[in-house]
């Protein structure tokens, strides 16, 4: 005897629901495996973290600022020395004349 169409559709629906659940489980497993492999590759690649990169970047900015301040100080000292040295030379030249 033939089953009513609704029972057949119910069975088909249950099978499809199980297949979708199985496919989602396989997808989650594949995603988890891929993620763990990528993390392992990145860890073994000896790459820096964002936090380490930012720390070194801030240190480089601070060093550059300090270099700029020291350059300005050197320029000021050289100007002061050049200003002191010029009158002595002028005084010696006028005395020699």
Image (tube, helix red, strand yellow):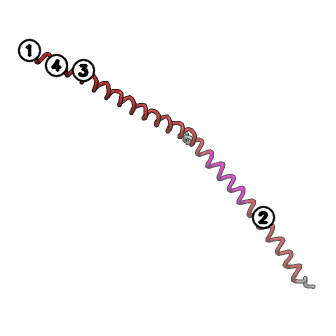
Magenta segment: does it hold 34? yes
Query: In the rendered image of this protein, does residue 26 appear above or below residue 70?
Result: below
Find residue 96 and report its image quarter. Answer: top left
Within 10 Å of disc 2 (Cα), the crowding (few <14, some 14-19, many 20+) is few
Compare marks 2 and 1 and give the one earlier in the sequence. Answer: 2
Report how far apart the C-alphas of labels 2 and 1 lie in the structure: 105 Å
- The answer to which of 63 and 73 lies nearer the viewer is 73
Q: Secondary structure at mark 3?
A: helix
Report how far apart the C-alphas of labels 4 and 1 lie in the structure: 11 Å
Q: Which residue is mark 1?
A: 96
Within 10 Å of disc 1 (Cα), the crowding (few <14, some 14-19, many 20+) is few
Q: Which residue is mark 4?
A: 89
Q: Secondary structure at mark 2?
A: helix
Report how far apart the C-alphas of labels 3 and 4 lie in the structure: 9 Å
Q: Which residue is mark 2?
A: 21
- The answer to which of 18 and 64 lies nearer the viewer is 64
Q: Magenta region's main secondary structure? A: helix
Within 10 Å of disc 4 (Cα), the crowding (few <14, some 14-19, many 20+) is few
Report how far apart the C-alphas of labels 1 and 3 lie in the structure: 19 Å
Left or right: 38 in relation to 96: right
Residue at the image point whose x is 32% and y is 27% from the top: 76
Residue 84 numbered tag? 3
């Amino acid at each position: 005897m033939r089953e009513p169409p609704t029972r057949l559709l119910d069975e088909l629906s249950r099978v499809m629901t199980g297949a979708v659940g199985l496919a989602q489980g396989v997808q989650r497993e594949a995603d988890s495996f891929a993620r763990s492999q990528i993390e392992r590759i990145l860890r073994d690649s000896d790459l820096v973290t964002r936090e380490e990169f930012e720390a070194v970047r801030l240190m480089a900015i601070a060093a550059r600022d300090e270099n700029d301040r020291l350059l300005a100080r050197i320029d000021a000292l050289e100007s002061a020395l050049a200003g002191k040295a010029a009158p002595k030379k002028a005084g010696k030249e006028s005395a020699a004349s």
